[in-house]
């Protein structure tokens, strides 16, 4: 999805990441997540990348280094 947003619709990597995090959470009515801020639920993925642009071009491979759900490390993080 990130790749399509950048390649087909001309969004920057930062805009496409916002679209699948903050804006997606708002569209689903989940005001307590989608961004890092005090009071927000801590659901996040940790990525083994050097820049947001890498999320948009690594097709078919997971660069996910870990997952946090509700503030706790997820035991079965992708590897």
Image (cartoon, rainbow, N blue to C red):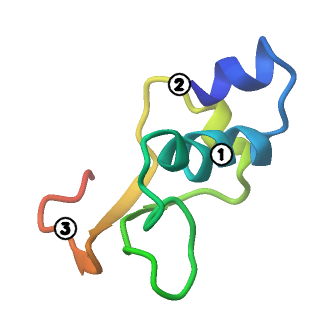
At x 78%, y 11%, the residue is: 8
Determine whether the residue tagged by mark 2 lies in a helix, strand or loop: loop
Q: Which mark is residue 74?
A: 3
Density class for disc 3 (Cα within 10 Å; few <14, some 14-19, many ≥20) is some
Which residue is painted at 65% across and 45% down in the image? Answer: 17
User: Callout 2 environment at 10 Å: few (<14), some (14 to 19), or many (20+)?
Assistant: few
Quarter of the image holding residue 77?
A: bottom left
Quadrant including the N terminus: top right
Please give the residue where the numbered disc 1 appears in the rendered image.
17
Above or below residue 19? Residue 71 is below
Q: Secondary structure at mark 3?
A: loop
Expressed as whole percent of the image width and height from the top left, the position of residue 27 reads 52, 39
- Residue at 48% in and 49% down: 25
The reply to whether the C-beta atoms of the residues labelled 2 and 3 are less than 8 Å apart is: no
User: Residue 60 sits in which quadrant?
Assistant: top left
Decide if residue 49 is on the left or right side of residue 75.
Answer: right
- Relative height, residue 15 to residue 79 (above, below): above
C-alpha gap between disc 1 and disc 2: 15 Å
């Amino acid at each position: 999805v990130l790749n399509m947003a950048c390649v087909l619709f001309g969004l920057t990597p930062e805009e496409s990441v916002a679209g699948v995090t903050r804006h997606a959470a708002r569209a689903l009515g989940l005001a307590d997540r989608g961004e890092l801020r005090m009071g927000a639920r801590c659901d996040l993925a940790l990525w083994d990348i050097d820049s947001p642009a890498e999320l948009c071009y690594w097709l078919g491979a997971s660069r996910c280094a870990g997952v946090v759900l509700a503030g706790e490390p997820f035991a079965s993080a992708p590897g």
